[in-house]
Image (tube, coloured by chain):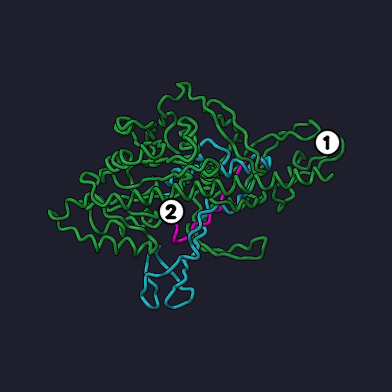
Amino acid sequence: MHEMSLAEGVLQLVEDTARREGARRVKLVVLEIGRLSSVEPEAIRFCFEAVTHGSIAQGAALDIVDVPGAGWCLPCAQTVAMSERYGACPTCGSHQVQPTGGTEMRVKEIEIE
Amino acid sequence: MCTVCGCGAGETKIEGGAPDNSHEHTHVHADGTVHTHSHGHEHDHAHSHDGAALAGAHAHSHTHADGTVHVHEHVHQGDHGHVHGHQHEHVHADGSTHSHAHEHPHGHEHAHDHHHHEHGIAGDLDYGTGPARAHVPGMSQARMVQIEQDILAKNNAYADANRAWFDERGIFALNLVSSPGSGKTTLLCKTIEVLKDKVAISVVEGDQQTSNDAERIRATGVPALQINTGKGCHLDGHMVGHAMQRLQPADDSLFLIENVGNLVCPAAFDLGEHHKVAILSVTEGEDKPLKYPDMFAAADVMLLNKCDLLPYLEFDADLAEANARRVNPDLTVFRVSATSGDGLSAWLDWIEAGLEAQRAKRSETVDALKARIAELERQLAAK
């Protein structure tokens, strides 16, 4: 259930930014959630609606940008696409793959007025 | 609700904490300054929301910079019926593009144009109040603000402050994580019994409820502080920061944090420890590291506990180790039994090596500072 904590973290960043910018309302929040991060986009969507209730971001739309997974495969010595965090290399089947992309969990931008 | 971890308001209890929830905070600012202050835990969000009508005309008032107020009505234009789940492409300011699908649960959110008001110096020229209630469409008051920050940035800032605090004092901090019932507390008690005569030790115990574990630790004669997370599923950097202030661990000491028994959430929350230590007991399945990979990837050390029971179980310890190394090839593994004491010496040696490294790091910084002071004094004397 730590998606709730993450949603709180998102709201905190959004509120801080909105306050700094003198915003009246937050219309849109854009997150980047990598496919190899430990977050379920659907769960965070659910929690986001719950935690923003009564805040400046109430009713804001939530865009989740899906970042594809990538990793560096040691045996292949190249970057390969990864669909799961601890998955095997799609080319050689080795598990010696270091994730290099798709692990992010970030608040990218917000739309305010 | 706690703004750090999302657990229920007032649910987090730190033993001996002030009952009024007022508490002391340490903040680290972007420029590196640190300040500590205390305040109550009430967060008042007084935001006014204009009555956002779902469709049709709505009236609202504007207050202008020159003090004039006008009330006007406008009609939301455009099609309110959206296609749900459509694909579209954004072009960002930096030129990158991304395409994605999303839903529009509230049709009006993106639909209406914001009218633009032209105001004369006297504040009497307002197209919105004209007889035709004319608008200048297409001018949006909305704007995008880039944030580009990690969602866990706040927790990570607390954790970094904790780690810096430990490093300044030569303290070696470990975060023990496992599922409930793996023998964390027993292992801690045994570890403390052996090490307490060599090094000062303080312990933080995290559980949803009860202070049973802290009492077990205190029985060994070292200070322990219980944190009850209430509805929370993990300790976070903020809670541990408070616990550190309360416990005031000695310089060059060992600081042990027993996290909430949970193989999922504690993996994501840095507490400022130097290593996460995952404990897996042989009464669990060999495939635990594959089922809960985040935790075994986040840990630097795995203790395979309850190894005295191996003769009575069908547990393949080699397979468990291989599975753990599959998610984390750099993992250090110790096979131990906290009850019989088998294998504990390697684990204890590892802790002592860590303590030594922390002390060395601290004296290095102290030596570096002393060298700098000497250099500055030399420069002063030369003037």
Could you tell me residue B281's position as x and y percent? Answer: 25, 50
- The residue to which callout 1 is attached is B123
Where's residue B68, x and y in %?
78, 31
Instruction: Report the residue at 87% width, 38% height from top.
Output: B121
> Which residue occupies the foreground of this view, B113 or B361?
B361
Q: Are marks 2 and 1 on the same chain?
A: no
Q: Is the residue marked by circle 1 packed among few (<14), some (14-19), or many (20+) residues within 10 Å?
A: some
* B253 drawn magenta: no
Q: Which residue appears at 48% of the width and 50% of the height?
A: B357
Quarter of the picture containing the C terminus of chain B is top right
Total labels drawn: 2
Q: Name the residue tied to disc 2.
A: A39
Letter of the chain that mark 1 sits on in the rendering = B
The green-tinted chain is B
Per the image, label 2 sits on a secondary structure element best described as loop
Check residue A25 for magenta coloring.
Answer: yes
Q: In cyan, which chain?
A: A
Regarding residue B259, the answer to whether it shows in the image is: yes
* Quarter where residue B297 is shown: bottom left
Chain identifier of the residue bearing label 2 in the image:
A
Residue B263: % across, % down: 33, 49
Magenta stretch? A23-38
Residue A1: which numbered mark, if any?
none
